[in-house]
Amino acid sequence: MARELRSQDADCSIAQAAAVMGDWWSLLIVREVTRGHRRFDDLLGELGISRKVLTERLKHLVEHGVLTREPYQSGPVRYEYVLTDAGWALAPMLITMQDWADRWLLGDGTLTGVAAPQSPEAARVHALLGTHIPAPLRLPAAINRPPLTTPQTNTTDQTDSTDQAESANRTDSANHPPTTTDPNGTGARTPATIHLTGTTNRTDGANHLPPTTDPISTANSPSATTGPDDTDETRGIDRTGGAGDMVVRPLVAISQTTSTSEGTASLDVVADARATVLFAYPSTGMPAPLPPGWNQVPGAAGCTLENRIFRDRSPEFAAHDIAIHGVSTQRPDEQTAFAAAEDIPFPLFSDMDLRLAAALRLPTFRAGQALRLKRLILVVDRFRVIRHVIFPVLDIPAAISEALTAAEAIN
């Protein structure tokens, strides 16, 4: 438990914070709540902690304003633990600790924007397969224009299933297997079997990429990131085919948006669509310049190229009711300026407060005195289940094609 503050530490903010969060279990409880494990039994299962210790630590965190209790059922009343604003403000601390350990404890101290396929970072990201993205998870998003899409068809799974008896000690939450009624209100139920996939061309059954030459090196050239030769013709993209059949429709329902400043909105990171392709990237060079030495950090360059390829292929995704969401730790105004300059048709999210990074324990690296997300792609179904993971991303065009194929396979 927290120690009593010494009189000489009364004015020390570090000591004050340590008195609240310096305990091992307190840190891990906050880590799990950011991941969406909000109920007592869920926390017990994730942490392997005794009921007595968990009860004491939860009481301590509630008393100090890190967590609050909210009822999720009545008769009997049961509560879940939700982060307050003060609690969410700890997300950057968690990711800073994770980033430090990834580099200096689990790594060799090298600054890099990629990860070895068999590294702890890669194992952590691929362990997301089959898990849920916590709901709701809203971030500021730059919206330049609605995406192109064909008229939506009903792709909701209509498989009949019967209700399963609910455990006396546990009710479904956002992170439990999807056996409940569709939260979007369609009345449909999720498939009984979820087929999960990692990266393609696996040779050992793990979610690892085969050894290849890193094609991202081509993105380090000025033409790849600044664009003089980055045209539809050079990439073999035909913008005209089928365009006459397209109609304009936002893939994000109006009810899911909350207006913020001009050009931005607060959106859920998972769209109301057949699937969401969520791609994380370190940083674009607009409007703020990239930090010195950016191109020397492996995996850092190529963000503008990646956004442009997703932009140019967005009609292919939209034709199958697949939403594209980009995310980086850049500020909302930076995302808005880039989206306008590059005519990006999909939302670009700002995870500057590292809420998404903390919720999914996404890998980062530090450059320009800021934490940047390492490049990865997640394919998420409409029930928020992560169905496909691509990490590390060593070939951007191939990874985008892989993401489209994986999303198309979702019913």
Image (cartoon, rainbow, N blue to C red):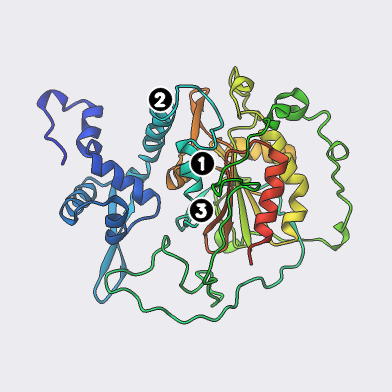
Q: Is residue 41 above or below residue 312?
A: below
Residue 345: image location, x then y, percent: 71, 48
Position of 365 relative to 384 (above/below): above
**Residue lying at the far front of the rendered structure:** 204
Q: Give the mark nearer the N terminus: 2 vs 3.
A: 2
What residue sits right under mark 3 in the picture? 129
Q: Compare marks 3 and 1 and give the one earlier in the sequence.
A: 3
Q: 395 or 201: which is nearer to us? A: 201
In three-dimensional space, the C-alpha distance between marks 2 and 1, rounded to whole angstroms, equals 24 Å
Residue 287 visible in rendering = yes
The quarter holding residue 150 reads bottom right
Q: CA distance from mark 2 to mark 3?
A: 26 Å
In the rendered structure, the answer to whether residue 244 lies left or right of residue 174 reads: right
For label 1, the residue is: 351
Numbered disc 2: secondary structure? helix
Cα separation between marks 3 and 1: 21 Å
